Structures are given as structure tokens and as C-alpha cells.
Amino acid sequence: MQTFREHRWQSFLQTYENRARLLISCPDKPGIVAAVTSFLYEQGANIVESSQYSTDPEGGTFFLRIEFDCPDIAVRKQEIESAFQPIAASFHMDWRLRLHNDVKRIAIFVSKAEHCLLELLWQWQAGELFADIALVISNHEYLRSTVESMDIPYFHIPVTKETKAEAERKQIELLKQYEIDTIVLARYMQILSPAFVAEFPGRIINIHHSFLPAFVGARPYERAYERGVKLIGATSHYVTDDLDEGPIIEQDVARVDHRHHPEDLKRIGRIIEKTVLARALKWHLEDRVIIHGNKTIVFY
């Protein structure tokens, strides 16, 4: 018998079976939007959402995200990509065409803190995150029952300084076995090696418990308290080799004062962290984020 969740997803997939997204970045020049929209019109497409941005109309970089409906897009995707290639070449485009129903498979990495993981699981269960949570990997056993109660595989891979390389080898094997598109570090309290990051460029999303670039690294709430800050925050960003310095996707803050001690800051911060991470992941899943150097263009 089909479960409610399976029925809901089947209905959702049928509703958007003809929808796709086209993401473009290229040197800015006149005629880009006209060429793209005319092409989509010739393919029988109906544009339902369009966002664009230029870093500088005089010689900058142009970014475009178009969401559209097109009959039989799943069957015609390769044909449309081939037909679009001459236009892309003429404007020197970096581009990709993604089907709305091409659901990304994600892996969540977590340690002991549960708030970010629980928020993602709840939003996924409620249909707010259109993704397939394929597995959860943790360096602790602490959250196994929570994850497995939702029929999601849970893998415990302990990490020590001596076993880090072997642990990452096992993690990479699992990620490839499960054909993972996106990795989410939901308060995973381990620093990934450059070799690991290189395997998944632009595909690892982290939540850092401070308003970057302030308080990079460990113990940011304690350091914020010592500094007497009046705002604390959280930052979700793509992971690079430089600790907590990857392209920022989303941030938020909350006001605090002299009465708040480090534990108060952590309590307030947990609410910000889980919200910021969920928003960043949602935008990533919906192809609303384009990486540009060490920045991002986010079409909300």
C-alpha cells in the first residue's frame, strides 16, 4: 500500500513534470535575455519566473535564472540542450538546464547537536525540502534512533586525529555508493580535509554558529560573549579549503545584551542556526544559488 508521503510526492512530481530551470552566467552584453526568451518561446515554453543580475552593465558578469514549463521537457531535455548550445557559445555562457523533478540526493553529516538535523528532517517530512535525504553520517551514535525512526540509513563513523583519513575514505565511499548530490554539515564538528572537499566542489553546505566573518572557527559564542557583542548570528556557506571562508548563502542575527551569558547565546543561536541552514539548503535545492568566485548570487 502506498504511504501518505509517497502519495504526496507522486502528486507533486506530476504537478511539475513539465517544469525546468535554466541558470546562466556570462559576460554582460546586450541581447542575452532576448536571445534566451526567444529560444524558449520557440521550444513552446512558458516562463513562470525570471530573475537576473549584472555585476556591472559595462563589462561585468550577467546572471540569469529562468523557471519555465515546457511540454515533455523530461523527454526533450537533451534535444533542447543541443539546440541551445549555439546561443550559449555566442554569448560565452556557463549554463545548466535542470528538470524540476530531478530530485537532489542529500547526505547530512551531524555530531551530537540535534537542532539543525531535526529542522531539516521536519521540513523534509512536511514537504518543504524537495529532496531525497539518502543517509545521515555521524561521528557519534547519539542520533541514530531519531534518524532511523524515519527510515533513513544512519552510519556511525568515529573520527580521531589518527583515523581521520580512513574515516573520510569510508565517508566518500558511502557518498558515491548513494549517489549523493549535496552534503549538508548540520553542526558536524569536524574539519573536512582538502582532499575531501575537492571530491565535492560547490556541493557541501555548512552552518557556522557566528555571523561571519566574525569569530571564525571554534567556540564563537564564548568569544562573542568575551567581546561583548550586541548581535549574534549564524552563517550558511559552501565549504572550501579555507575554514569558514567559503561563499556565503544565507545569514541572520538576533540582538543580545549584557545580561546574556554564553549558554544564553547558544540557546538563542540554535534557533538562528537551524533556520539559516534550512533556508540555504532550500535555495540550493531550488537552483537559486550561483557561485561567483567567493561570493554567491541568490535569486530568492
Image (cartoon, grey):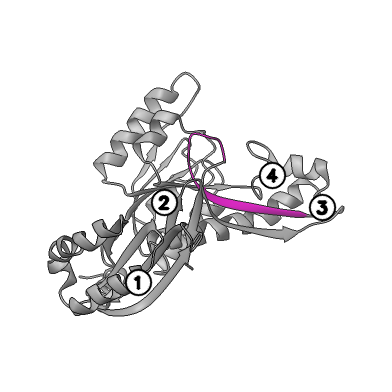
Q: Which residues fall within the magenta stretch? A: 231-244
Q: Nearer the viewer, residue 227 or 291?
A: 291
Q: Which residue is mark 1?
A: 33
| Chain-order first, disc 1 or disc 4 | 1
| Chain-order first, disc 3 or disc 2 | 2
| Chain-order first, disc 3 or disc 4 | 4
Q: Amino acid at mark 4?
A: Ala
Residue 19 in which image quadrant: bottom left
**In the structure shown, which secondary structural element does the residue marked by tag 2 occupy?**
helix
Q: Nearer the viewer, residue 214 or 127?
A: 214
Q: Which residue is mark 3?
A: 260
Q: Nearer the viewer, mark 3 or mark 4?
A: 4
Residue 101 is situated, as x and y percent measured from the top left of the image, at: 26, 66
Q: Amino acid at mark 2?
A: Val
Q: Nearer the viewer, mark 1 or mark 4?
A: 1
Circle 3 residues within 10 Å: few <14, some 14–19, many ≥20: some
Circle 2 residues within 10 Å: few <14, some 14–19, many ≥20: some
Q: Nearer the viewer, mark 3 or mark 1?
A: 1
Mark-to-mark CA distance, 3 and 1: 51 Å
Please state if 111 lies on the left or on the right of 261 as rendered: left
Mark-to-mark CA distance, 4 and 2: 33 Å
Q: Is residue 192 above or below residue 264?
A: above
> Where does the N terminus fall, quadrant-wise?
bottom left
Q: Amino acid at mark 3?
A: His
Q: Which residue is mark 4?
A: 214
Give the farthest residue toward the right: 258
Q: Amino acid at mark 1?
A: Val
